[in-house]
Image (cartoon, helix red, strand yellow):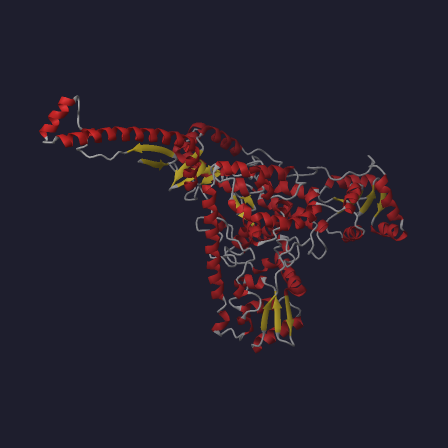
Amino acid sequence: MDERVICEGNFVLSSKTQASATSPCDVPSKDEGNLSTVMESININEEDHNELNKQKHEAKNLDQVLKQQEKASTVLDGQNLTEVNQLSEGVTVEEKDADPVFDGTEAPELETDKAFSSQNMDPADPEVQVYAWPEKAVALRNFVREKSAVAVSTMLRRLSSKKNQEELGDYNDIVTKGHDKDQDVETDSKENKVSPKDGEQSLWNPLNFMKIRRNADSQSKTDHLEHASFDNLLQETIQRRIIVYTRLGCQECRMVRSLLNMKRLKYVEINIDIFPTRKLELEKRTGSSVVPKVYLNDFLVGGLDELKAMDESGQLDEKIKDLFIEESIPTAPLPPLPGEDDESGNGTIDDMASIVRKMKESIIIKDRFYKMRRFSNCFVGSEAVNFLSEDQYFEREEAVEFGRKLVGMHFFQHITNENIFEDGSHLYRFLEHDPVIMTQCYNFPRGVIEVKPKPITEIASRLRFLSYAIIEAYVSEDGRHVDYRSIHSCEEFKRYLRTIEELQRVDLEPLSREEKLAFFINLYNMMAIHAILTLGFPARALERRTFFGDFKYVIGGCAYSLSAIHNGILRGNQRPPYNITKPFGQRDKRIKVAFPYPEPLVHFALVCGTRSGPALRCYSPGNIDKELIESARDFIKTGGLFVDSESSVASITKILRWYSVDFGKNEVEVLKHAANYLEPQKSEDLLELLSSTQLKVTYQPYDWSANY
């Protein structure tokens, strides 16, 4: 029989033939006389002699058969050696834990009409707090279900062969992320980099078959972003021929936008605060920098009053019809050019980056084993110390300190964050070699930026500036509807994509509480828009898991998903609803960035693109608390909490239920907290009903559809 032993990807063959010590194969035989002598010495008769000869002949035949089987097995093993090595690698391949994510899935027993909601509302009554236990049970069940699905997916992926990968390579292009056909160069380059490396993750996932019908069902929704109607296509021909000069915070500019949108006219907006050189151009053309100013080709309409007058007289419609016939005139104002007045990417080259580049060329970077796991693209600490000692003329102790300085600048880190940097056999990995950063971070299209990192306050200010401009121009005045198509094609969003690349190696420690709060809220909202434009809108629970958990930015050397920002940073590392794990573990470096306690008002500011979410706004660090209170009042007053005094029923948003621990210990405290943001009379009615312990609470269904 053949015994096969797999040892770290190597295939070893060994053949064993079981035979007795008295077998004729083990007896030396030169000729027949010698055989007779031997037989006589052990008193074997003639019949035994014939039987032994027969056994000898059979043993030779058996030995020949075994040799043939061994040769055939060797040939077969040679053909399958690659597949065996792949299977061996799959068993020990590095796998990153997914971020805990709330995808909107709830248990039937915890739906809107619940028995506890109509019970006595006395906070001293222990039955009021009973509802927390079913939620924990559901969280445990969801956790087991999630891990089971991951285990099944991993096993199927490991058992899949290379042949299946090649056959399904073209098919998987249909179900890969990224629905927008008009993606810009930055997004295209990012998609080329998100493909997992060979050996780290299989290209084929059998669970993709489960996504076919889902993607087909959601295609009609993504068509809203991808395809325009015939009328819109006609408007595209004149979009670049209607130019509107604006600036931030201008009320008349908002009214001009409303008028043009009401007439369903597409236009190009030039914000002179974002593009300061266009302010000089406007002064040269009109003799003034007063905005708004509207141009139809090279014809100056003027400001708001002139535009209204032309519209009322019918001259505007006639002029618009001429734009379909007229050709674009060279003397007309041009739309913003790519990279115009853009400060992102500028700066001095980091000297440390040059040293790191030389280090990558000198030390050995390869896959290595550590604690029964295989980690890709690692290097040994002692080799890095050797390089730094020779290149920088350091003693080994000085080289270790210099290496720790490089770690602090987010060039590389320990593979499991067990230490900062040590001399010895510890394994480390450069930032661009981290599999999560390579495959899931969408602000990392060209690798590590070698420009010296700018202060986080400066980057946050520029990002806030861009967010303000995008929201003001392409979001409705109530903040409930977003023009994703226009955002995708505007130059402000392209500048935003270039600016977020500067977050790779920033230092977040200098941020104050107010600055950090405004920075992460604004980043979350823009990151959600970026995810929708890249992945398409998540229509179902599985898509929302990818949306909230797998779309990430690398900030300060760490990867942050939408869920990590929401639950890990802004909620003080609290577990998401119906989850039993926290976003950050004890060794996670991101836990130092998290707030020490939950910020409950962020739930009225974070917008993930749903209709039931709050209004989309931009927040400033100077007035962050005041602005959050205003957002909470707006959300609660416009349907987040409705109280019917006659029937003693309160209908509240599910956001207050999912994140109830951030607002109070029980339902009564949550409602009292929400009452602070109601109008005075409604707040008094709610508190009176709570004191009478006769209030019935129902939860509004959450609308996960897109806020187009």
- Of residues 272 and 530, the one drawn nearer to the viewer in this rendering: 530
Q: Is residue 454 visible?
A: no
Q: In which quarter of the image is residue 276?
A: top right
Residue 49 is at least partly visible in this image: yes
State left or right for residue 268 relative to residue 646.
right
Residue sitting at x 81%, y 51%: 263
The residue drawn where x is 46% and y is 59% is: 140
Q: In this view, does 107 lie above or below 148?
A: below
Please, is residue 367 above or below residue 38 in the view? below
x then y, percent, for residue 656: 57, 63
Residue 237 location (% of width, % of height)? 79, 41
Q: Give the x, y percent position of residue 33.
A: 13, 22
The N terminus lies in quadrant: top left
Depth order, front residue of 166/532:
166
Relative image position of residue 378 (x, y in whole percent): 44, 36
Name of the residue lying farthest toward the front: 47
Residue at image coords 24%, 35%? 18
Q: Residue 300 vs residue 276: left or right?
A: right
Question: Horizontal placement of 67 versus 183: left or right?
Answer: left
User: How many numbered dots are placed on residues in this image?
Assistant: 0
Q: Hey, which residue is sitting farthest bottom in the picture?
A: 692
Q: In the displayed structure, would residue 11 be above or below residue 623?
A: above
Q: Nearer the viewer, residue 75 or 492?
A: 75
Q: Quick check: 399 left or right of 700?
A: left
Residue 279: quadrant of the picture = top right
